[in-house]
Structure formats: structure tokens, C-alpha cells
Image (cartoon, grey):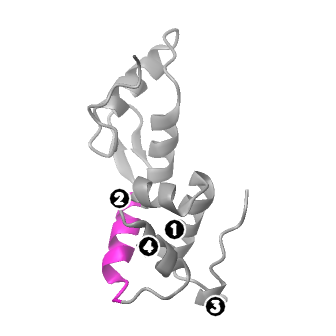
Amino acid sequence: MNTVDISAWGDNPPEFIRVLANVVEQEGTKAAAASRLGINRASVSTLLANKYPASTDKMEQVIMAWSSLVQCPVQGPITGEECQTERNKPFVGSNQMRIRQYRACRSCPRNPECGKSRHG
């Protein structure tokens, strides 16, 4: 996995930039990270390069809100990253906890695929 370059922010980049870089690393591309966060790919690029043409306040709010704790109906309070990890796990019909989690994730408002079926 390639490390995302955030050197334009200096030695101590803001937390939201570190979160953004982490999402890009996890997703593999800026476009995939943008989709996961619900923002424009160009915004991801310009934010990471410290060349965002406007105030970064709104982007910071969006990124940090995504990464903050969420109330999972199955597990209780979890981070946005844990939420994404659980949402991406496959269906396991032999484990009652996974069945509950899978069903909850399919109807969760944080799920960008909410309402779409992953099974044919």
C-alpha cells in the first residue's frame, strides 16, 4: 500500500488531513476515497496537496463527522472506520451476531449502498 503524500502540510498536518490520507490509503485511490466520504475527487486531491481554493472548514467538518463515533444498533458506539469495516464484511449465515450486523448495515443511513442489494 502506498503512503499518501501530505508533506505540503508540513510536519504537523491537521487531523482531518491525516484522516483523509488514511481513507485514501485504505481505499487505494482518491476517487474511491472521495466516494466513500461523499465528496468530490478533485477536493481530495487539492486538500492533500494543501491547494484547496477555499476555506477548508466545511471539508474538515465533513471528514471529521464521517470519522467520528457512530451509534451502531448492534455494537453500540463505534468509530466511522469500524462502521466501514463491519459494513464490508460478508454475510455469514451461521453466526447470529453477523446476521444481525449484516442486516443492520444494509439499512444504515451511513451506508452509501443503502437500499441496493449485494446478492443477486
Q: What span is in magenta?
A: 54-66
Quadrant assignment for the N terminus = bottom right
Residue highlighted by disc 2: 38
Estimate the x, y position of residue 67 in percent, counting from the top left. Answer: 43, 59
Characterize the local packing of mark 2: few (<14), some (14-19) or many (20 or more) Cα atoms within 10 angstroms: few
Does the CB distance between marks 2 and 4 fall below 8 Å?
no
Residue 19 is a magenta residue: no
Label 4 amino acid? Ala
Report which quarter residue 72 is drawn in.
top left
Outermost top residue: 94
- Numbered label attached to residue 20: 1
Residue 68 in sight from this viewpoint: no
Task: Give me the residue at 51% from left, 75% from top.
Answer: 45
Residue type at mark 1 is Leu
Residue 42 tag number? 4
CB contact under 8 Å: marks 3 and 2: no
Check residue 63 in the rendering and tell me which mark sits there, or answer none: none
Q: Residues within 10 Å of mark 3 (few under 14, many from 20)?
A: few
Question: Which of label 3 and label 2 is nearer to you?
Answer: 2
Spatial separation of the CA atoms under disc 1 and disc 2 = 12 Å
* Quarter residue 69 falls in: bottom left
Image coordinates for residue 80, horizontal then vertical, percent? 44, 52
Helix, strand or loop for disc 4 = helix
Q: Earlier in the sequence, mark 3 or mark 2?
A: 3
Q: If you read the primary sequence from the N terminus, does the residue marked by circle 1 or circle 2 appear first? A: 1
Identify residue type, mark 3: Gly
Q: Is residue 106 above or below residue 29?
A: above
Q: Which SS type dominates the magenta stretch?
A: helix
| Residue named by callout 3 | 10
